[in-house]
Image (spheres, rainbow, N blue to C red):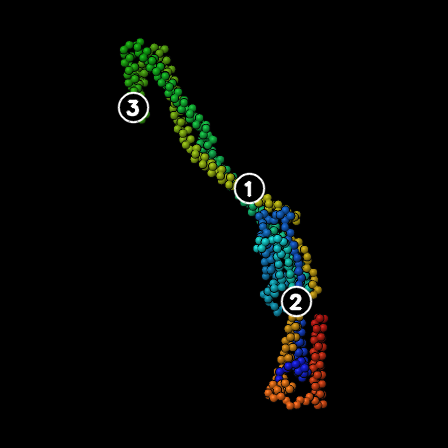
Amino acid sequence: MGPIVGVKEFIDMLRRRGPVIALILMAGLYLTITHALSLARSYEAVTVIQIEPNILGGGLAGESSGDTAARLRLIEQRLMARSNVLDMIDRFDLFDDAPELNEDTRVTAFRQGTRIEFVPAAGGGPGSDRELSAMLITVRAGDGATAANLANDMADQIMRSDQETRNRRLDDLIETLQREDDRITTAIRQVQVQAEAFRRQNADSLPENTEYLVGELTRLESQRVELTRAQQALERELLAVEVGTAATAGGRSLSVVQQLRTLEVDLAQARLTLPEDHPEVQRLAAAIEDVREGQVRQMTPGAARQVELIRSQSQDLDAERAAIDQRVPQIEAQLAAIPTTSVRLDNYATQIATLEVSRATIAERLSRAELDKRLASSEHGDRMVVLERASRPEYPVSAGRKRVAVLGLAASLAAALAAAFLLEMRRPLLRTPAQLQKALGVAPIAVSALRPSRAQRRRARLRDLTSATIVTLGVIAIGMLMLSSGSA
């Protein structure tokens, strides 16, 4: 057989192998249509949910657009969880026509046929924190009504879950903030109690007493100087009285005065080196008293009363000086403790101020959370509305059947043509002068047209009739198959 070099030769080849070509083509096409019709139809339904932001530009206290997107993705994960997917499969009787499928296969098929898309708001920047404006819920199922009902049910679940999630988050936030506010308030009260107790314990060394203590210390120093001067004046007056009395009494009294002065000098020196309860100090004090009593007995009644009065005044001045000497060290100790007390009080004040700032921040966030709670309850907060509910689709969206039919037709046609060529190659013939000259390298001397016999013409007609019959029967079978599938 030479190569087919023209349309006429190709058509002759098709006529010669018509029954084989028709049989292979019709059988392949019938099998292809049968397989395509066995494929499940797929209907798609879409529900659109619009995400409306807070009319006051709020949302959860401190919540951003990224938080909203994250919250919706968490809702999506809960919606597509295995338990919830199996619940939807049971409620909508999905995969009832395929009882051989196990739970894992059904869950996988459900997730593959369901798609949730987030639509960013106009002007939103790229990234995960961009603001969302809508959600698209796309569901594919073998029945249009089931696909629409399932899409709407998923939309209702998302909206209900979003509302419950926002309410729960708001309640948890409010409860947490209130608990934190109570804790800070308790801490402030404790610090205040500690500060007040410290002020009571150190009432004498408070910073606000500095001016009073300094003034008191100055006044006491002045009084001590005046008391010293008054003491000296009384001593001079007492000496004058005693000297005058001694002058009138004679030489013995004068020696008593000198003895008294000597004893007083010795007592003063002894007190500088010995304690007050030392025997020597007590002996000198007793001797002075004895001398004085003896001197007083020798004085005139008027001089004796004057000496007694001067001594009484001197004792009062000594008592006042002793009180001043006792108070001055106390004041000095209190003044020395004021810086430490001031530091402690400043620390308490700093702690209280820090806690007050934290409480103010908590109070502000609590107020915002309570406002969001009221807005959410009155449907003025961030909410979701169904912009377009899914309706029952009239036509399937799956192109699988058409694609399988087209591919099967092409494969069947290719197989039929390949079989025809293989059959032609089993009987190679030279049918044209050109083929003969190319094969032998000799030009034919004469060419005569082939005149088929009556039997050959009858076989050709029978072959053509067989091809037409096969094609007709195949078309009828395919038509009946499509009609039966359509009615089912």
Q: Which residue is mark 1?
A: 360
Q: Residue at x 69, y 88 (%)?
A: 449
User: Which amino acid type is shown beneath numbered disc 2?
Assistant: Ser
Whether residue 128 sits left or right of residue 258 in the image: it is right
Query: Visible in this render: residue 69?
Result: yes
User: Which amino acid type is shown beneath numbered disc 1?
Assistant: Ala
Q: CA distance from mark 1 to mark 2?
A: 60 Å
Residue 346's place in the image compared with 308, above or below, is below
Of label 1 and label 2, which has the lower sequence position? 1
Q: Where is residue 70 shown, x and y percent of the image?
A: 58, 54
Q: Which mark is residue 398?
A: 2
Whether residue 225 sits left or right of residue 61 in the image: it is left
- Structural crowding at the residue carrying mark 2, measured as other residues with C-alpha within 10 Å and reported as few (<14), some (14–19) or many (≥20): some
Q: Where is residue 117 shown, x and y percent of the image?
A: 62, 58
Q: Which residue is mark 3?
A: 270
Residue 286's place in the image compared with 435, above or below, is above
Q: Where is residue 15 shown, x and y percent of the image?
A: 68, 83
Q: Where is residue 435 shown, x and y percent of the image?
A: 62, 85
Which of 92 and 130 lies nearest the eye of the viewer? 130
- Of the two numbered discs 3 and 2 in the rendering, the one whose residue sits closer to the viewer: 2
Q: Residue at x 43, y 26 (%)?
A: 216
- Structural crowding at the residue carrying mark 3, measured as other residues with C-alpha within 10 Å and reported as few (<14), some (14–19) or many (≥20): some
